[in-house]
Amino acid sequence: PTLRMLSEDASHVLKRAKELRSKVNTYVDIVESQAKVGGGAAPENDIKSYAISIPHSEVDLLEQFLRAWHIPIIARIANDTLLIDLKTVFDEEIDEIAAALNAALERNYD
């Protein structure tokens, strides 16, 4: 899986982002991102990627909900916006992530 992720063309990541966007029940934008390779031989290398972007008034609580999902979903926050990078998401995980996002967005955080 690691080699596939490292060598995958960004157009395939964009396709996954579009599929996820179509399954989420709110406004979702797709933004270019830079996935981090991590440690080892390439600790500072970035790879072109795409993320879904969801602005939310309670973005911290939204992120915590996703992290606590029965299969933790790791997102990041930038400028009061939730970002989920699709570089390390498999096709078969899209439905689960969409279900978690929809459940999180249906909650009343007040």
Image (cartoon, grey):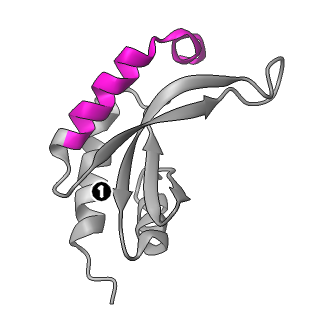
Amino acid carrying label 1: it is Leu
Secondary structure state at the residue bearing disc 1: helix
Indicate the quadrant where residue 10 lies.
top left
Q: Is residue 77 magenta?
A: no
Front-most of residues 72 and 77: 77
As drawn, is 36 to the left or to the right of 100? right
As drawn, is 5 to the left or to the right of 52? right
Q: Which SS does the magenta portion mostly show? A: helix
Q: Is residue 81 visible?
A: yes
Which residue corresponds to the image point at 23% horizontal and 42% vertical from the top-left?
A: 21
Residue 24 position, x and y percent, is: 20, 50
Q: Is residue 11 magenta?
A: yes
Write down the region rendered in magenta: 1-21
Q: Is residue 26 above or below residue 60?
A: above
The residue labelled by disc 1 is 101
Which residue corresponds to the image point at 26% horizontal and 76% vertical from the top-left?
A: 107
Q: Is residue 61 above or below residue 43?
A: below
